[in-house]
Amino acid sequence: MKPGQGSGTAEGAAAFRASHTLYDSNPVFRDPFAIALTSPGWRRILKSRLLHWLVLRRYLRSLRPIVAHVAARSRYTEDRLEAAVRRGVGQYVIVGAGLDAFALRRPDLKSKLRVYEVDHPDTQAMKRRRLKEIAPALPENLEFVAVNFERESIAQGLSRASYRKDAPAFFSWLGTTHYLTPQATFATLRAIASVAARGSEIVLDYGLTRELLPARALAAGKRLSRIVSHRQEPFLGRYAPDELHREVKAMGWEVVEDLSGAEQERRYFAGRADGLAPTGGTHFLHLRRSL
């Protein structure tokens, strides 16, 4: 991410959620605020059916599976979150919140869930400027927590918020581990564990090591790598599931589910006429604090 600017990958993810919401039949996940929160350039493309087709269906067609992945990871996370809320979890911490507008999308959970958006100050400032244009009065259950992860941990950031360490929480951490070194990812998971009461949960996504990547993931992965490297947000972290599981278990996390790309396709994309499906190169990991 360039200093003083918001995250370009966050804008891209918002554009992909908007594209899926607006142009795909039977969306796996709907985000009606995505188009308003992404960049002016993306908005011009998304508002024009012709430009959308030219850019996302022709020029960037190799990234179509990434659109599926972005939609599926949000759907999976919020399915798991709703189950946690039914069990009485009342805190939701969105780590690297980007331009998702969960608190706006889910007013039905306003009385049940306190939402903490944790992100880099520059990305958060960009987001808050855009939010003013669509929601001058933000939801009362939403709290922003600005954290520069190069200087402090999420634990330090949450210590400044109303977050309660003695109460279970649900954490989501999406679209981020790919851009961090394994050391930084593990440090963040330990920091989250240090403030997560027993029974707390987290969902994150992670990329597979190159030797484990399915063939169809390679082309999209190479194209996306070139794009994010140009934005100074290169891919740095890839994992083998067994090794990752060992690491997180040593921190006190229990592996509830590790959803492979093939399983994502069966669960969310089976029977689609448009062929939309993820690449299979990224897993969804659901963990529960066991200690």
Image (cartoon, grey):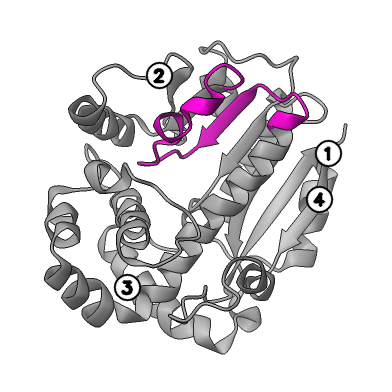
Residue plotted at (33% across, 31% down): 124
The residue closer to the viewer here, 276 or 243, is: 276
Q: Choose the circle earlier in sequence order: 3 or 2.
A: 2
Identity, as a three-letter code, of the amino acid under mark 4: Val
| Looking at the image, residue 169 lies above or below residue 58 | above
With 81 as the anchor, is 101 left or right in this view? left
Front tag of 2 and 4: 2
Which disc, if any, is residue 139?
2
With 209 as the anchor, is 131 left or right in this view? left
What segment carries the magenta color? 85-113
- Location of residue 267 (image quadrant): bottom right
Mark 3 touches mark 2? (CB < 8 Å): no
* Distance CA(mark 4)–CA(mark 3): 34 Å
Residue plotted at (69% across, 30% down): 85
* Distance CA(mark 2)–CA(mark 1): 33 Å
| Looking at the image, residue 261 lies above or below residue 85 | below
- Give the quadrant of the C terminus: top right
Residue 101 visible in the current orientation: yes
Q: Choose the circle earlier in sequence order: 1 or 3.
A: 3
Identity, as a three-letter code, of the amino acid under mark 3: Arg
- Location of residue 159 (image quadrant): top right
Which disc, if any, is residue 256?
4
Identity, as a three-letter code, of the amino acid under mark 2: Pro
Mark 2 touches mark 4? (CB < 8 Å): no
Give SS at disc 4. Answer: strand
| Looking at the image, residue 114 lies above or below residue 265 | above
Give SS at disc 2. Answer: loop
